[in-house]
């Protein structure tokens, strides 16, 4: 799915009024919420693309878009140039001072739409948001992993709680059908509130100009096989599994000239490098970290 289609799907849900009938124009402003400080690039690269595109569309009609970070140290160039006003706020709040600051900001800046990432469907703070004038709350769920279905009395209580409109989000956007089914079975979110919006990427426009230089930089020739994985270097992304696969392949088929490229930054980088060193895979497995030339890397891969 193209990134633009992903953003279109998000904004379609975001602009849907809290109550029918449908409206042709919208009053109020948009608050985008980050869970991490402004310089945590590895965690929020994809979300930053969403924020930029959503804000661009939202502000075309004269509305304002705000982006709340729990801490602002250094803004990315893209955010600095975007039609987004940044603010230090911790949402959801964890103490009275944060609560006071958030409530004042929502009230004084006419916030009608809030876009959250990886936050719960049910939260008592949502009722306060709505009392302050927020009409629509969207949660974009990127959280990974399988979770068991919740049944019995606990499931019934969750389902009942999740019917309370003031205390729950209006929509949960899931990155796959599997995640949608998980949210309905485990979190007991109503089916009509769960929607699939897959993470899109721009279509690749490959040229051969950069391929030789890239292969040469890792010691591969034109006949080598390049296997590339991209993502955040976090334990739940299981880069360690790919490294183990490379190790097994080396034992079973040492004559195959294959290189594994792991592109992406994150907190697991030291452990992954230790694993590579321990298995003596320094020549065949490469941690590339954050790369701005990911299109060239994907185009050069097999």
Image (spheres, rainbow, N blue to C red):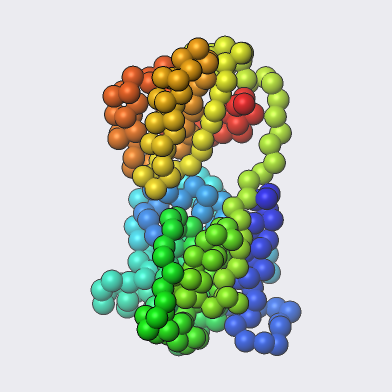
- Residue at image coords 50%, 21%: 259
Note whether 153 is above or below 223 in the view shown: below
- Residue 145 visible? The answer is yes
Q: Nearer the viewer, residue 53 or 246?
A: 246
Q: Position of residue 256 (x, y in %)?
A: 52, 16
Give the residue at x 52% y 49%: 46
What is the count of numbered marks?
0
Q: Position of residue 174 (x, y in %)?
A: 55, 62
Quadrant of the image containing the C terminus: top right
**Which residue occupies 63% across, 70% down?**
13
Relative height, residue 10 to residue 155 (above, below): above
Q: Quadrant of residue 171?
A: bottom right
Residue 1 vertical placement versus 189 (above, below): above
Height in image: 93 above or below 48? below
Residue 282 x/y as whole percent: 38, 19
| Residue 150 position within the rendered picture, expressed as x and y whole percent measured from the top left | 41, 73
- Residue with the most extreme right position: 24
Pick the front one: 258 or 89: 258
Q: Is residue 97 left or right of residue 42?
A: left
Residue at 41% over, 65% down: 148
Residue 26 vs residue 262, the one in the foreground: 262
Examine the rendering and report whether any part of residue 66 can be seen.
no
Camera-side residue of 22 and 286: 286
């Amino acid at each position: 799915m193209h990134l633009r289609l992903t953003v279109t799907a998000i904004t379609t849900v975001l602009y849907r009024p809290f109550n029918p009938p449908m409206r042709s124009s919208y009053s109020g402003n948009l608050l985008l919420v980050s869970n991490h400080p402004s310089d945590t690039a590895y965690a929020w690269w994809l979300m930053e693309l969403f924020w930029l595109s959503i804000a661009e569309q939202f502000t075309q009609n004269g509305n304002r878009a705000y982006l709340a970070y729990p801490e602002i140290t250094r803004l990315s160039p893209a955010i600095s140039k975007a039609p987004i006003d940044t603010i230090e706020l911790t949402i959801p709040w964890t103490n009275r001072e944060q609560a006071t600051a958030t409530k004042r900001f929502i009230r004084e800046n006419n916030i009608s739409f809030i876009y959250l990432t990886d936050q719960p469907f049910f939260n008592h703070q949502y009722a306060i948001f709505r009392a302050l004038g927020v009409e629509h709350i969207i949660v974009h769920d990127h959280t990974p992993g399988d979770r068991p279905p919740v049944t019995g009395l606990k499931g019934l209580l969750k389902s009942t709680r999740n019917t309370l409109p003031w205390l729950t989000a209006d929509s949960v956007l899931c990155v796959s059908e599997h995640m949608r089914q998980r949210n309905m079975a485990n979190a007991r979110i109503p089916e009509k509130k769960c929607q699939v919006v897959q993470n899109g990427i721009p279509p690749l426009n490959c040229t051969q100009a950069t391929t030789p230089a890239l292969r040469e930089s890792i010691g591969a020739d034109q006949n080598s096989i390049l296997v590339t994985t991209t993502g955040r270097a976090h334990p739940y992304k299981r880069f360690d599994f790919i490294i183990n696969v490379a190790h097994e392949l080396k034992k079973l088929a040492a004559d195959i000239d294959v290189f594994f490229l792991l592109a992406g930054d994150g907190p697991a980088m030291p452990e992954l490098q230790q694993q590579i060193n321990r298995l003596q895979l320094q020549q065949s497995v490469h941690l590339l970290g954050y790369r701005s030339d990911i299109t060239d890397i994907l185009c050069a891969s097999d």
